[in-house]
Amino acid sequence: MTEKKILLNDAYSLKTPEDSISLYKKWAPTYDRDFAKSSNYISPLKITDFFLKNCQIFDTPILDVGAGTGLIGEYLNKKKDKKIIGIDISSEMLSEAELKNCYSSLLKVDITKKIPLRNNSIGAVVSAGTFTHGHVGPQAFDELLRITKPKGLFVVSIKKEIFIKEGFKEKLLSIKNDITLPELNIFNIYGKNNDKKKENDKAYAVIFRKK
Ligand SMILES: C[S@@+](CC[C@H](N)C(=O)[O-])C[C@H]1O[C@@H](n2cnc3c(N)ncnc32)[C@H](O)[C@@H]1O
């Protein structure tokens, strides 16, 4: 019997971290080919570009939040000269990321809970596709700020439709004394592809530094 193909709507209908674990367990082996390549998913590439335009030599180590199969690592660490830690709730997605040999470590972490990393230990936070429908909400920024060094850089994608609706704008306002003024860059999540509906899918690359 053939398995039903996983669609983007399945990912957008998730409600709890347990739902993510179960969906991404099934999706991990085919995610790169059946989703990322076939839909021309370019968020990881965009976040990498924004990171490279804004980063300084001291922005290390880099934490990839919701690293998944490691698409950011693949783009960002082509020369294998960066220290990137990947965290994700799905061990199956992390196993795919490991095959890419771009991460210095990969940790199974639920970022809606306490993150098992020291205060002020991370030089930069990057993330693509994790702050989206049914995945991770704005509360995760408290823990991410705790583990980031003063002056640490954040370059994270937040799906446009949920930016206000799910409280990301409000969260950024509530932490405004702890961060520089966030820069919001809108971008298309997908490049040219056959699915017209996806053409309007947009996210913000939200860029700021911890004070
Ligand atoms: C759409 S994928 C994006 C993966 C990768 N960043 C990319 O752009 O291809 C979302 C990822 O978020 C992870 N995720 C969902 N909820 C999470 C949580 N509570 N803590 C950590 N990771 C989570 C999923 O396991 C999945 O790998």
Image (cartoon, rainbow, N blue to C red):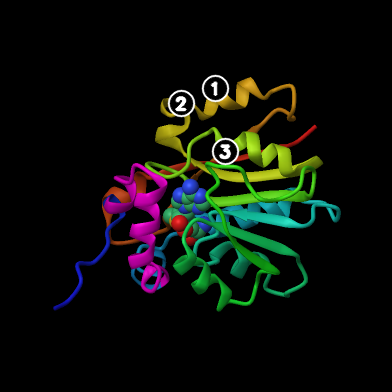
- C-beta proximity under 8 Å, tags 1 and 2: yes
Q: CA distance from mark 1 to mark 2?
A: 7 Å
- Residue placed furthest toward the left: 1
Q: Main secondary structure of the magenta part?
A: helix
At mark 3, the secondary structure is helix
Q: Position of residue 29 (x, y in %)?
A: 39, 74
Q: CA distance from mark 3 to mark 1?
A: 13 Å
User: What crowding class fits label 1: few (fewer than 14 Cα within 10 Å), some (14-19), or many (20 or more)?
Assistant: some
**In the rendered image, the vertical position of residue 99 relative to residue 144, given as above or below:** below
Which one is closest to the eye, mark 3 or mark 2?
3
User: What crowding class fits label 3: few (fewer than 14 Cα within 10 Å), some (14-19), or many (20 or more)?
Assistant: some
Tell me the quadrant of the picture where the N terminus can be found.
Answer: bottom left
- Name the residue carrying label 1: 170
- Between 21 and 167, which is closer to the camera in this rendering? 21
Q: Position of residue 69 (x, y in %)?
A: 50, 67
- Name the residue carrying label 2: 164
User: What crowding class fits label 2: few (fewer than 14 Cα within 10 Å), some (14-19), or many (20 or more)?
Assistant: few
Tell me the quadrant of the picture where the C terminus can be found.
Answer: top right
Q: Is residue 16 magenta?
A: yes
The mark found on residue 140 in the picture is: 3
Which range of residues does the magenta coloring cover? 10-32
